[in-house]
Amino acid sequence: MIEIIKSLSQKIGIQLKVFEALNFYSPFINSFFMYFKMPGYESVYIWRLNKITMQKIVTLILFVLATANAKSQVITIASARNLATGNNATVRGIASNGSEFGGSTRYIQDGTAGICIYGSTLSSVNIGDSIEVSGTIAPYNNLMEISVTSFSVITTGNTPHPPVSLSIPIAFAEQYEGQLVRVNGVSFTGSGSFAGSTNYPITDGTNNGQVRINASSNIVSTPIPGSSIDIVGIMSQYTTTYQLLPRSLNDFITIGNPPVFTTSLTQSNIATTSFTVSFQTQNPGNTIIRYGLTSALGSEVTDATLTTNHSINLTSLTPGTLYYVKGITISSSGDTSFSSIQVMGTQSLSSQTITSYFNHPVDTSYASSPANYSHYLNHVAADTLIAYLNRAHHTIDVAIYNMDDNNGIVTALNQRAAAGITVRVVADNGINTTAWNSLIGSIQKIQSPGSATYGIMHNKFVIIDANSADPNEPVVWTGSMNFTDNQVNTDAQDIIIFQDQTMARSYTLEFNEMFGGAFGPDKIDNTAHEFNLNGTRVQQYFSPSDNTNIAVKNALLTANTSVHFLIYSFTRTEIAYPITDNYQTSTGYFAQGIINDTAASTPVWNALIGNMTTSNLKINSFGWLLHHKYAIIDADNLSSDPQVVTGSFNWTNSATYKNDENEVIVHNANITNQYLQEFAQCFENEGGVVQVGINPVDVTDNFNFSAYPNPFSEKLFIAGYPSEASTITISDVVGKIVSTTMVANQSTVIDVSSLSPGIYFVTLAGKGIQQTLKFVKQ
């Protein structure tokens, strides 16, 4: 019978040595034949019968053994890459990345090639792990992948395969997909700070390529290098585009010994004729700030001191004016680092008033005083907008997702244009056709692209007289309201209006970018972000170019006592986590909110509900849309930093990466309280009981401790405490004191540049009184 097995094995092409072990079972096989040998039958017949039967049995055994052998056979990654989709493969390789690309994606190499492996069980795999992987060949958007069914770690702590140095046109090709490569002497063509899940063009002066920054990488929010560098990364592919994936900041390799920017330029101390520009570097260098009214710059201020904490005050500036600013620093070895050009503005000479409106009822019992009642526009939101349009003397720029003329808004625009006002309109590709075609010929207009690549033009802002010679004429109108009948009169909306020339001019930069044909991911970060309106700090961001999602997240992390939010669409867990993380970092903290577009099973809902419970987290149950996109932070804690985050920006992937959006963050207790009044009415409509937290800070008439900015980066300014000796301590989230400062004056500046990014608590103690505020280090 052994001969039969050998014969069969040869017929199906299996090596004989695989089955030599069956000799061990030959007594069993012989017994099998003897057992079936029956008296009265010819032995030849019996032998033939059992031979046929055993051939079938043995064939089945051999098939199973052959299949098992084929499945377990390890092949090279190069061989696996040549297999057709759906084939099984087992490969071994060393991991080139860890969690930098998320928990499910790893790239491995074995000396013959590299390949992407994907599976929910891979989160424990680290760089340098040697692993054996079995799975199915399953390309994703032209990227060769193995969909992992099982894996095992063979050894850890190995050195990944070294990157191969290549020029751009050679590196960005199928031959190197899945492998570590290095491109030398390349520059990014963009400026600003890196966003996650975003591609950035690079060039060597002749050839171009794409670098993709993953949302899980520590590269996110760091400044885009302004000088030539070498980049290491894994060559990947999406559809027809090859893209280099750097894993961390360590994959950006500077040439020589330059200072290297570790932060973008930051602006502070904004006044009508001056402001301060600061930045940090990895290595010491001098400080040079070049600035001007255009990107050509023209003026320069220098400080020869070698430092890693750079700060220069620009003076003799013009009020209400935007400046283009670039940082430069040179090390002792003569190597130079450059920042990208950023836009910054001076304080204007406008009235700088901020006004909020709501088109649904408000609960004024939550007003901080009768003088701070919220403004409820009872079916007069359209009339209010038209009144502002009629105030225009020179220009009206409108960026709107949708509108109709049911309330006379299109008619008002036509009338202003007919009166000689320059009217321009940017609208989404899907705007109401009748309204769009009703705009008269003298109105200049453009629609966003219809391609899915660009998402939607979702802004809802109006700029009036931005460049008027009278600083009291410029106005910015923004918020959540589209200009259609349902949006104006039925759905719940908030409107916020700024009478400020600097903000109007910054919004105009964004408008001009879209009016010039750049939408969505084609835009760049080219507007100012910090404004001073009569002492109120206002931040302004546009999406997707300005990392708006990170600005929202950072604002939420500053909450000491409370967050209240009304959000139309909320799908990004990265924004949900700060709301819940605050429960662990701030004693007495709570959050309440309503989401319009969700269900009680989404990742966001699951992230929030554990801490918030259904008493504090609601889903809109009414027929009208809860169209808001706002969060109220520390409305009940005047010693903290009460602020409102609002605009057109939903907390979604589309708003973050594709849509044209705008967002403002207003650090003002009165405005925050006005939004709280509207939130309270909406929450009560859902049967909720509004919480207003107890201020944990003991505030007395002669003790008004304040600290800023928040978030901070290199310096923390503290003021308003007693002139007697006080102690200021800074501790981390586990209670470890990381800084102690004794002060005797009523203000001081603490150097916090050495602190790692994270959450910190600043405590001031003196005269038997103690206050603690929470801060975020960027």
Image (spheres, rainbow, N blue to C red):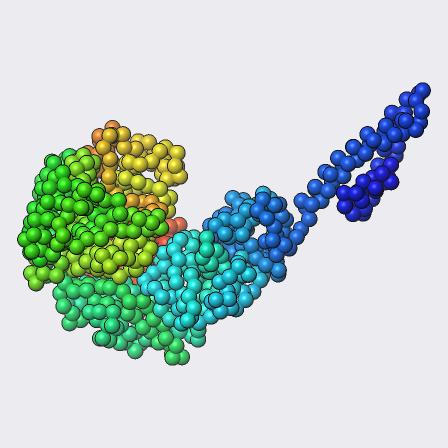
Q: Evaluate whether residue 367 shows in this view.
A: no
Is residue 519 positioned above or below 680 on the image? below
**Where is residue 518, by image quadrant?**
bottom left
Residue at 37% x, 71% y: name it: 227
Residue at 13% x, 65% y: name it: 319
Q: Position of residue 410 (x, y in %)?
A: 13, 45
Q: Evaluate whether residue 174 shows in this view.
A: yes
Q: Does residue 551 appear to the left or right of 204 in the view shown?
A: left
Is residue 46 positioned above or below 82 on the image? above
From the viewer's side, name the closer residue of 615 and 706. 615
Q: Position of residue 230 (x, y in %)?
A: 45, 69
**Where is residue 30, by image quadrant?**
top right
From the viewer's side, name the closer residue of 717 and 468. 468
Q: Position of residue 501 (x, y in %)?
A: 13, 59
Q: Does residue 22 appear to the left or right of 486 in the view shown?
A: right
Residue at 53% x, 49% y: name it: 139
Residue at 80% x, 44% y: name it: 10
Q: Quadrant of the N terminus?
A: top right
From the viewer's side, name the closer residue of 578 and 37. 37
Q: Quadrant of the C terminus?
A: bottom left
